[in-house]
Image (cartoon, coloured by chain):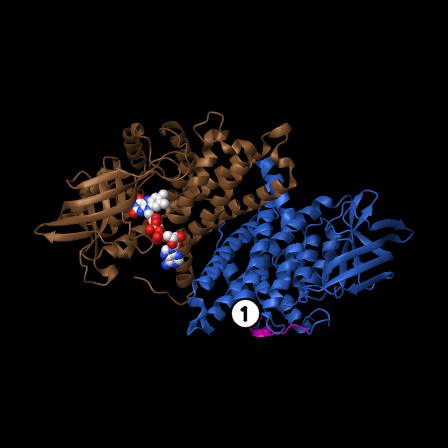
Amino acid sequence: MSLSLGEEQEELRLLVRTFLDDKATSHRPPPPGTGPQKYDGGLWRQLSGQLGLTGLAVPERFGGAGLGPAELGVVLEEMGRALFPSPFFATAVLAGQTVTHCGDEAAMERWLPDIVSGALTATLATAEPDGSWAADPPATVADRGRDGWVLSGTKTYVVDGHTADLLLVTARCPDGVGLFGVPATAPGLTRTVLDALDPTRPLARIRLGATPASRIGTGDASESLAAVRDLVRAALAAEQVGGAAACLDMAVGHAKTREQFGRPIGSFQAIKHKCAQLLVEVECARSAARFAGSVVGSPGTEAAIAAAVARSYCSEAFTHAAKENIQIHGGIGFTWEHRAHLYLRRAKSSELLFGTPREERARLARLTMSEGAAP
Amino acid sequence: MRLDTSAELDAFRAEVRSFIRTHAPGRKTHAGVRAPAPALVPELRRWIARLHDAGYLGRSWPTEYGGLADPRPEPAFVVAEELARARAWGQIGAGALAAGALLAHGTEQQKHRFLPRLRSGQDLWCQLFSEPEAGSDLAGLRTRARRDGDHFVVDGQKVWTTNAQYADVGYLLARTDPGAPKTRGITAFALDMRAPGVEIRPLREITGTADFNEVFLDGVRIPADRVIGEVDGGWRVAGASLAQERGSVAARSAELLDDLSGLLALAARPGPEGLPPLGDAAVRDRLGRLATRVYVADLMSKAVQSRMAAGTDEPTDPAMVKVFFSDTNLDAVSLGVRLQGLDGLLAEGDDRAVDGGYWQDALLYARAYTIAGGANEVLRTTIAERALGLPREPRS
Ligand SMILES: Cc1cc2nc3c(=O)[nH]c(=O)nc-3n(C[C@H](O)[C@H](O)[C@H](O)COP(=O)(O)OP(=O)(O)OC[C@H]3O[C@@H](n4cnc5c(N)ncnc54)[C@H](O)[C@@H]3O)c2cc1C
């Protein structure tokens, strides 16, 4: 293993970069107050079925490529760079990895092939209005009715929750935290799209009123969900690296061309040093995210430490890059039409998704206290 | 955190670790690149010889000069890491730097004379680059070397010369052509530190220790065959040898990881009323932030090491590692003092000082890393210009 990409990973990166450069450039932010950015269904089918991206980390027996979090990271870094609006993160990472690691063959057979082909979009709904990402036990309850399980409660901050075909929902069961599959069309389910800080990553609130659901796996799902959370955190960290790198590129591009006082602003040390510092942080963030991508999914505390390090660092590196990018652009960077604010919105929002930097730091302090720091 | 390595490298690491445990003389009690106590120097010369004989230092050198001609940087990283981890002494002074210059630019005669003496610990080297008026702007150096038959005669002053008090040979930069553009009139020399006219005056640092010196050169005669590289070609020689200094990339993060372990121990130590600092959520947050940075510094250094091993590294990689390391180190050692509560007031002279006053000394020393070997501001300019292609500013 190395912190540099292997040959095939580099090919994958180029493939995704080229695809996004060709197909997904210059999307402007939607006017304020008009809701989240919509994704392009045609592009979705191309990147899933044709390019096989949604199946990268799905086992081969379900039509996937049988690769892992490192490759998902490669794709997400590129998508984060482009701020590409698509249900990829929700479908391939949140739902795809939850199903892949749920240990329930029937569930895998039922959903994974359609995730691979792009026929199905899906997401994971764990957060609840009390403000925690993985309430344990969840306030949402599962009851065994005459015709099977029914769920009641409210989930919120559900990524792509208003468009996903399938929702994976956590709920309190007699035997612990249960994981359930709920089709978006199920009776008693209502969804409301939220006015999210980041219009490029739609969020929804889902209300469940005695909504029929199928249970995934048996017994308490807390442990497999915790493992999935490490995968999700590594993936998000990679996406943050891409976002930070895009901000740096934009800032450097502007600093080279914008002239004041008769010379490019990039010749002033105040601007130069900001850019150099961002490059250091982007390189550091990339090392942390790649390492997390190479160890999450394997047992042991190293994966948990790596995920916490990556999320804690990449979150702040991205936010810093997004803020400095606006500063370096001056007035033009403060306009709605310029994409700079979209990166700040994405950066701030992705800090909060699935655990804040502060929570990650507390985890890390705990983990290193019990592990000892030395390699 | 460890990257998977080969079984061979793992075995090598285990061997080096046990070698150091068994044979290393003295443990460093201070952080950083420091001068040893005088009494330890003879033993360190023997230790340096042992490290070379075992193939741990100078491993990449051609076999005719005693190396193993091993082109891979990984074993050198392992050695640097293990020495730092154990807080053991390695090469002291500027030996690695000088070896880089000699191997790349030295004459056969110079290599045969100096390299074996360097390996055997017989010659300790110091780096005579910086001057009172030439620090970041090194090319502005004024020390003059004038040709006089088959000798050069040197007059001038060097400063901040670490380990000059023990050095046998100085790796000197001096101006041979004052009329040429700044970088073109400089020549590199191997200077006998015992030559008449060389005067070494110790300087005391903010830590209270005397690690570096002023070196006055007054009519010092250097034989012309001690010119390293071409006359007036010293700038290139210096550049090449600085690029050779790769081990430090690995050593620094090993020391940081060791400090993190120390910080965790401090945080768990009962303070006033018997409560450990770790009980405080703000302390946990600070510790978590620091642990993040330390691990990231380590991973960044490993990423650069693997690029170096693959030959895909960028010229600015070491500068990026250094900037991030030195900022992180400053935070780490500040936290080390902070976690001691009122005991933070004591320094190493007090026998009740926590960890023998290590953190107080390290806090003061931390500024060496942000200044020496390229001040961070200057490195950021270099990174911006070389790695990002931003417009260059005026320089020599
Ligand atoms: C502990 C220690 C050990 C050392 N050992 C040795 C040794 O063994 N041999 C040796 O030759 N030298 C040695 N040095 C010297 C070291 O290389 C210099 O201190 C360093 O290059 C900085 O030069 P200076 O001290 O003259 O500071 P200056 O160059 O005067 O810098 C002062 C401040 O100005 C800033 N600055 C300077 N130029 C610019 C610019 N263009 N843009 C923005 N900011 C700028 C710097 O970043 C710094 O903050 C050592 C230094 C230390 C601290």
Report the residue at 69% width, 62% height from top: A115
Q: Which chain is brown?
A: B
Q: Residues within 10 Å of mark 1 (few under 14, many from 20)?
A: few
Residue A83 seen in the figure: no
* Residue A65 location (% of width, % of height): 60, 58
Ligand 1 near label 1 (Cβ, under 8 Å)? no
* Residue B219 location (% of width, % of height): 14, 46
Report the residue at 65% width, 36% height from top: B279
What amino acid type is highlighted by mark number 1?
Gly
- Quarter of the image for the C terminus of chain B: give it: bottom left
**Which residues, given as a range, are shown in magenta?**
A19-30
Quadrant of the image occupied by residue A66 = bottom right
Quadrant of the image occupied by residue A25 = bottom right
Whether A40 is drawn above or below B250: the answer is: below
Q: Is residue A99 left or right of residue B33?
A: right
Say which chain tag 1 marks: A
- Who is closer to the viewer here, B215 or B118? B215
Q: Which chain is blue?
A: A
**The residue tagged with tag 1: helix, strand or loop?**
helix
Report the residue at 17% width, 45% height from top: B218
Q: Is residue A211 left or right of residue B261?
A: right
* Residue A280 location (% of width, % of height): 48, 56
Residue A116 seen in the figure: yes
Tell me how many marks there are.
Answer: 1
Report the residue at 50% width, 49% height from top: A1
Q: Is residue B3 left or right of residue B79?
A: right
Q: Which residue is mark 1?
A: A330
